[in-house]
Every structure is written in C-alpha cells, then in structure tokens.
C-alpha cells in the first residue's frame, strides 16, 4: 500500500506537512505556528502535557477543526477546506468510538459502504482487515463482547481497511490498564512496521512516545519545543521543558556565577555550587538558569574518595529506596539544602543493602549537568 | 430473630398498602366495573342480559369503526409529524447547544405546558379562526381578499395535536441523544460518511429507544385526546373519544360507551405492540 500514484508532486515522500499552523480560541492560542513533516511510513508522535494543543492539532489534521492560518498538506496536497469525510485520513479516537449498534464486521465495513464499494468486494476486504489484526473470527461479535485490547485492534482494522494515507491516533492507550498498555505499545509498533502506513500519535505519556516512535515532537503551550528521534530528545534536549518532560531529571534553579564558552559555575538559591555545560548559546554571568541532571548520570558511593574525579559532589542521607527491579531509584536528601535528589540504583550487589538514613556521596560530571535558560513557569 | 422477621414483613405490607389501595380502588375496581358494564345488554326497561352485543355494534355499524380507523390513522400521522418536528429540536438541545443555552432551550420547550391544554388550544383558535390573527395578517398583506377560516378542518387538528405532543417527544429524544458520544458522530464522518449516512447508521439507531418511547407516548396521548380534536376540528372532527363521550353524555348509553372505551384500550395496545415488533424494540428496553 506504499506505492501510490506516479510522482506528480515534487515532495511525494512526505505524507503529512504542517506549515506554520495557528489555531486560536478567542484570546487563547491553542496551536501557535507549528511546522513539521512526517515522512512516508514513519511513526510520528506528538508528546505534551494535557492542554498543550496536541489534540487541537490532530483534529485539524483530521478535518474537524480548521486552522486560522498556515497550511496542512497530506501527500503534498493542501487539505484546507476539505471536510473530514473527504480526507484520506482516519482517526483512532481516544475512546475508540466503535459503533455499539453494529457488529464488528459491520463496523469495519462501514467505511467501505460509505465509499460505495460494491457489496461483493466488501466481505473479503473486511475479512482481510480482521485477519491483519489477528482477529479473523471476531466478525459476528458485538462490540461489548470484546476485551479492551480487541476493541483497540478492531478500531485499527476499521481504519486500515480504508487504506488511509495517514492514521491519526488520539491517546488510544489511555483507557487501558497498565499491563495491556505495555503490551499494546509493542503491538502497535509492530503493526505499524508491518503495514507501513504513516502513524501520527499523540500522547502525554513519554514512555509511549519514546518506545513506539521514529520521530517525536515535544509540544508545550501550543508550540513545538523540539522534534527529534527519541534518543535525541532524551540525550540532547534543546530546551529546559524537554529536559524536564522527557525522562526523569533532577532539577536546580540558579544563577550563573562565572561562565566560559561552553560551561558555567551556577549557584542555586540554596547556596550550592554546580558546574554544568550550556546547551546551545552560552549565557552571561548573572543569567537565571535551570540545571538538569539525569538520575542515571549521578554516581553513588559510600565513601567520598571514589568520586574525587567528578566535577560536582554532594553528600546526603538516604531518604527512600524505591525498588522497581532494574529501574530502582534512591531518593537522597542533600545534607545542606534539604533538597531531594533522585539517583538510579546501580545494578550491583554493592548497594543492595542500602539502609534508610545512611550517609551516601553523590557526584557527576559537568557534561552531565545541562544548563538551560530558566523558563518562566513550566512543568518539571 | 423470628419476631424481627415478622416485623419486617409487617413493615413491608404497611409500606405497600397505599400503592395497593390506590391500584385496587382507583384503577382496578373501576375498570372491572366498566368491563361488566360493557358486557351488559339492555333488553327492556331496567332489564339487562350479559352478552357481546355492545362490542358487535362497533363492527357492524360502519360509522364507529370508520371513526376509529380515522382516529388511528390521524394519530399515526400526528406521531410521525411530531417525530419529524421534534428530532431536530432534540438534536439541537442535546448535541449542538452548550452550557446554559441547553437548559434554557429545554425550559422554552416546557413553558407552554405550564398552561392548561384548554388555554393552549384556545390560543390556537385565536390564531386560526376567521377573525383571528393569521386571517387578519393575510388580509392586511393583501394575500387574501376576504377573511380566511382555518379552523375546523383536519389540518387544524393536526397542528394542535403536534403542538400538544411536542414536549413528550422532545424529552425522551433529547435524553437518548444526550447519551450519544460525540466521538461516534465524528468517527462516522471520519470514516467517510456524509450527514445522511451518519444520521441513518449512527444517530438514529442510537436514538431508537427514545424514538420508540416518544412515539408510544405521543400516539397514546393523541389517540385518547378529546379536547384538541373537538375544539379545533369542530363537528367535523370525528374523533373516537368524541364517540365515547357522546355515548355516555348525549345518548346516555353507558353500556355502549364502556364497550367503546375498552375497544380503544385494546386496539391501541395492539397497535403499540405491532409498532414495537416492527421496530424490533422491547417495551422493557424502551422504558429502561
């Protein structure tokens, strides 16, 4: 289904382009100049906190809302003014929106009937679509007889049977319980690779976005903060928001004391001094900055002597041990500032017997402490 | 333990007593009395025998069953017309209006029903009669040379019946449409449906219980309506309830009137049952 009409358009490799799209509701700007493109066959996620405008953006792509300015192109053609039922784009709704008054096969056949596919052609297509989501026998069932995961797959089959240019997914895993959600993440990713349709997925759950996507756009207050692969977002965040939103991070707010071209000495309000590296342009002394350190970047030691080579060193007491198998963390309360620091527990027997209130030493290098210009309010 | 059980049982019967008394004394007994009355045939002065003659009269005298047929058909037509008028109103209230305007529109539908049906029907008479508002308006605008009588015909009856039934259709429709998830409508469009497809395949099937319960209520109300057909239709109305009234009051033939009453109950029940069968709905599903 990836081969389509001959290249009568120069940029045929892009399934979706959004060019400077703006949407306002009264005085509130929900989507503020968003530009991005999704290449054919990619899994593109838009990640952001609730209220960041991602649902509005998705609804504009689907055609339920129209942008105030900017352009949306699907397969190179502008779809402004094209109603949702005339766009070759289908959407998986947050609560799936399967039609409860129809059987499973009627649900899948609905779109084909709307298109005027002859009756004889509908049956085999529906059967093929159901087989593709591994539910070949579900056809005669009622919707309320399906489990959560099966409903999910029927919703996908109902869209895929129409062979859309673009499949939009509006947090479809949100309603599932944790175990099934983990399972569906993998399944969705595999399904997308198998069928090769471009997926545009919106979510507020960073792990969904990181696990499934080829490209992730982090959205905040109607704007895209950063677009990149999951690895880029995690290891090279470009803004304080991305650093705080994607993955866990310890965060300090402070003022630059001295700075050179690449790094700075930062003093926090609590009086601790941190040495970190700038991301992007260097900031002058006196500038307000946020410093982010990933929990796994922090080295943990019982003796201070082991950490002397590191640029930043702190000591504190173990406040809490959050055991979660390989993802266990230790919350350490800093002796001087009483601030809490999250540290990934190394997977060695050495720290298996870490006790509450035990004194530990922490350290990390300047390169692992990223300094960003402080953002006004912002989530962390 | 045992005493407590007895006490509980006594309490249950005491609580049940008002309802049981109400049903027996005010509903069941009069109905039984009516049934007995309808089966009584007058053979002479204060001489009666039991027999089905009163019922046979309905089938042998064409005027009676013709009147019934006319009433039933007009009622079906009025029900359909009410559905067609009420559906967009209910859809607007349930799906388009938001927040305060939703409640306001509901109240607007309700307000006319704070006034008695008699007064509302007189209102229509003021509008439609020869010297009424509409007639004067037509003459003033030059569309008509002389006064126009719009009362005392079937159209006037229809208008009055639809008006009187509107609320009973809007309420169940708005309630079921309100429970329709907006995303289902959007999914209907998203998958390529146009407005008509979405209405036919998503909205109407979902609203079916509301449509059927609204139709039953409106049909029964219309069939049993006396005031509106008599006032707006005049002597041409030929409404079946009018026949019952005539038997009781004008002709003082209570036996015949009672038989007609039971026939109305029976035949309308059969029609509702048939309607449920055709629409493949159950009474329990419709009310629940």
Image (spheres, coloured by chain):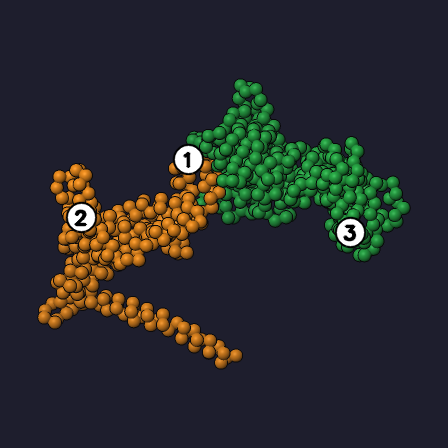
Chain colours: A green, B orange
Q: Residue at x 74, y 35 (%)?
A: A283
Is residue A178 found left or right of B82 in the rendered image? right
Residue under numbered circle 3: A337
Residue under numbered circle 2: B132
Residue A189, can we see it? no
Secondary structure found at label 1: loop
**Distance between the Cα atoms at labels 3 and 1?**
63 Å
Secondary structure found at label 3: loop
Sequence-first tag of 1 and 2: 2
What crowding class fits label 1: few (fewer than 14 Cα within 10 Å), some (14-19), or many (20 or more)?
some
Is residue A75 found left or right of A332 in the rendered image? left
Residue under disc 3 on the same chain as residue under disc 1: no
Secondary structure found at label 2: loop
Q: Where is residue B218 in the image (x, y as percent from the top left)?
A: 30, 53
Residue under disc 3 on the same chain as residue under disc 2: no
Is residue A16 found left or right of B264 in the rendered image? right
Indicate the quadrant containing the N terminus of chain A: top left, top right, bottom left or bottom right: top right
Residue under numbered circle 1: B194
């Amino acid at each position: 289904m990836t081969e389509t009409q001959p290249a009568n358009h120069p940029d045929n490799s892009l399934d979706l382009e959004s060019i400077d799209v703006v949407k306002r509701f009264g005085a509130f700007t929900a989507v503020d100049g968003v530009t991005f493109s999704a290449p054919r066959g990619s899994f593109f996620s838009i990640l952001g906190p609730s209220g960041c405008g991602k649902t509005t953006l998705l609804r504009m792509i689907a055609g339920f809302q129209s942008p105030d300015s900017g352009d949306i192109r699907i397969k190179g053609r502008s779809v402004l003014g094209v109603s949702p039922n005339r766009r070759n784009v289908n959407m998986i709704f947050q609560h799936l929106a399967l039609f409860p008054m129809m059987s499973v096969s009627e649900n899948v056949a609905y779109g084909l009937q709307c298109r005027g596919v002859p009756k004889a052609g509908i049956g085999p297509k529906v059967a093929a679509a159901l087989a593709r989501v591994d539910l070949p026998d579900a056809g005669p069932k009622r919707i309320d007889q399906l489990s959560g995961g099966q409903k999910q797959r029927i919703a996908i089959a109902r869209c895929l049977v129409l062979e859309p240019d673009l499949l939009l997914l509006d947090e479809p895993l949100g309603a599932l319980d944790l175990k099934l959600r983990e399972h569906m993440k993998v399944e969705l990713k595999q399904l997308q690779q198998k069928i090769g349709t471009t997926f545009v997925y919106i979510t507020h759950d960073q792990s969904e976005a990181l696990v499934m996507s080829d490209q992730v756009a982090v959205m905040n207050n109607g704007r895209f903060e950063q677009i990149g692969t999951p690895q880029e977002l995690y290891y090279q965040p470009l803004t304080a928001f991305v650093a705080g939103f994607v993955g866990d991070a310890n965060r300090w707010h402070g003022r630059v004391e001295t700075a050179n071209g690449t790094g700075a000495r930062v003093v926090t309000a609590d009086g601790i001094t941190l040495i970190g590296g700038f991301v992007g342009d260097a900031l002058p002394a006196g500038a307000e900055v946020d410093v982010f350190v990933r929990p796994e970047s922090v080295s943990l030691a019982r003796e201070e002597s082991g950490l002397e080579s590191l640029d930043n060193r702190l000591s504190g007491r173990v406040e809490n041990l959050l055991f979660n198998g390989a993802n266990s963390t230790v919350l350490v309360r800093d002796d001087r500032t009483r601030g809490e620091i999250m540290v990934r527990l190394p997977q060695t027997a050495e720290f298996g017997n870490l006790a509450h209130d035990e004194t530990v030493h922490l350290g990390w290098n300047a390169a692992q402490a990223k300094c960003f210009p402080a953002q006004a309010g912002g989530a962390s | 333990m045992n005493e407590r059980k007895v006490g509980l049982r006594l309490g249950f019967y005491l609580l049940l007593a008002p309802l049981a008394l109400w049903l027996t004394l005010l509903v069941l007994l009069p109905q039984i009395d009516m049934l007995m009355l309808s089966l009584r045939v007058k053979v002479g002065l204060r001489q009666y025998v039991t027999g089905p003659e009163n019922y046979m009269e309905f089938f042998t005298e064409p005027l009676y069953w013709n009147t019934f047929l006319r009433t039933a058909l007009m009622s079906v037509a009025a029900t359909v017309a009410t559905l067609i008028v009420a559906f967009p109103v209910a859809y607007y209230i349930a799906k388009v209006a938001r927040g305060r305007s939703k409640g306001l529109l509901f109240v607007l539908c309700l307000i006319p029903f704070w006034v008695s049906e008699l007064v509302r029907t007189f209102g229509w008479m003021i509008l439609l009669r020869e010297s009424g508002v509409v007639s004067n308006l037509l003459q003033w605008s030059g569309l008509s040379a002389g006064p126009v009588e719009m009362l005392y015909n079937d159209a006037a009856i229809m208008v009055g019946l639809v008006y009187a039934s509107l609320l009973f259709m809007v309420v169940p429709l708005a309630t079921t449409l309100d429970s329709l998830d907006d995303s289902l409508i959007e999914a209907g469009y998203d998958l390529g449906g146009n407005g008509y497809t979405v209405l036919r395949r998503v909205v109407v099937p979902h609203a079916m219980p509301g449509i059927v319960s609204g139709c039953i209520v409106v049909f029964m109300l219309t069939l049993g309506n006396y005031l509106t057909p008599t006032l707006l239709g005049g002597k041409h109305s030929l409404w079946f309830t009018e026949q019952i009234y005539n038997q009781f009051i004008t002709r003082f033939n209570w036996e015949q009137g009672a038989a007609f009453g039971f026939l109305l109950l029976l035949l309308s029940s059969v029609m509702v049952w048939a309607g449920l069968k055709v629409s493949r709905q159950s009474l329990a599903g419709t009310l629940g």
